[in-house]
Amino acid sequence: PAPPNPAAAKPATTTSASTPATAAATTTTNGSPAQQQQPLSSSSSSSSSSSTTLPPPLASPRNLTPLLDGSDVGMLFRRAVNDEERERLAALTRPHFKLAATEQLLGVFDCCKGENPLDAGEMFIFTNSVCFRRSKNSVQVESGASTKFSIPMASLLDVCPNPGVYPFGALLITIKGVQTPWLFSFFTEKEDALRVVRAAMAVASDARAAAATTAEEAAQQQQQHQHQQQQQQQ
C-alpha cells in the first residue's frame, strides 16, 4: 500500500491575514468566511468629514434672552445664517440701548473701552448709533461705572486707527462736542469694525443731507406760495 500523505493528514486550521490598515477575511475550520472588517482609513475620513458641519442656527428669541444678558453677543451675531436671525438678535438688543425699532444691527465686535484690557465689552454698530456694553466681569462694572452707553451716528465726526503702538487694535472716535477722542482698543476684528462704522457714518451723512435738501426745498416752496398769495391780494 502507498504511504500516507502527511499534508492530507493535517487538521484544518483557522488562518488570518491582516495589515495595519485593513483586516482581511478569515477562514474558519468549516471553510465559511468570517465577517470582513472595514478599512480603518475609511472610518477616519468619515469622522473627519462629519466634524466640518456648519454651525447650527440661532435658538428661538426666548432662548436667546439669557445669552444676551451675558457678554458674547458677537458670537451669536456671527452664527446668524440669514437676515431673519440677525433681525431677531437686533430686536432683543435694541431695548438695552433704548433704540428705535427702525435701527438695524450692522455688526458686533469685541473690544475694550480705553487702554485697560480688563475693561472689556462689545461694540454694537447700528444704522444710527454706535453703542458699547461692558461685560459683567469688567473692572469698571465692579467699580460702579455705567455698564452701557450709545453715541448717535450724527455726533460722530471721524473714526480712525490709533496712530500709537499701544494699545493694540485700537480705534479713535471723534465725537461732536467732546474735546478728546474716545479710545476703543483690543479689537479682535479692528479692520472690519472700522469699515462698518465708516460705512454707517457715510449712509447717515447722506440721509441727513437728503433730509436737509428736502427741508430747504419745502421752505422755498412755502416762500413762493406766500409770495403768490401776496401778489393775488394786491
Image: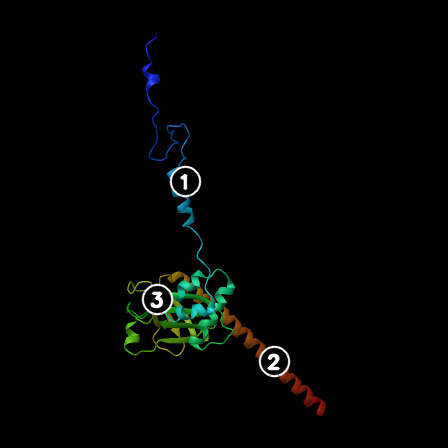
Figure check: 136 above or below 10: below
Label 2 element class:
helix
Residue 32 horizontal/vertical position (percent): 42, 30
* Amino acid type, residue under disc 1 in the picture: Ser
Residue 200 shows in the view: no
Residue at which label 2 appears: 218
- Mark closer to the chain start, 2 or 1: 1
**Of tags 2 and 1, which is closer to the observer?**
1
* Amino acid type, residue under disc 3 in the picture: Cys
Callout 1: few (<14), some (14-19), or many (20+) C-alpha neighbours within 10 Å? few
Residue 119 horizontal/vertical position (percent): 30, 70
Quadrant of the rendering where the C terminus is positioned: bottom right
Residue closer to the observer: 178 or 133 = 133
Outermost front residue: 1
**Of tags 3 and 1, which is closer to the observer?**
1
Residue closer to the observer: 150 or 97 = 97
Residue at which label 1 appears: 42
Label 3 element class:
strand
Outermost bottom residue: 234
* Amino acid type, residue under disc 2 in the picture: Ala
Residue at which label 3 appears: 111
Label 1 element class:
helix
Rounded to the nearest angstrom, the CA distance separating label 2 from label 1 is 73 Å
- Mark closer to the chain start, 3 or 2: 3
**Of tags 3 and 2, which is closer to the observer?**
3
Quadrant of the rendering where the N terminus is positioned: top left
- Mark closer to the chain start, 3 or 1: 1
Outermost top residue: 1
Quarter-wise, where is residue 37 in the image? Answer: top left
Figure check: 219 above or below 69: below
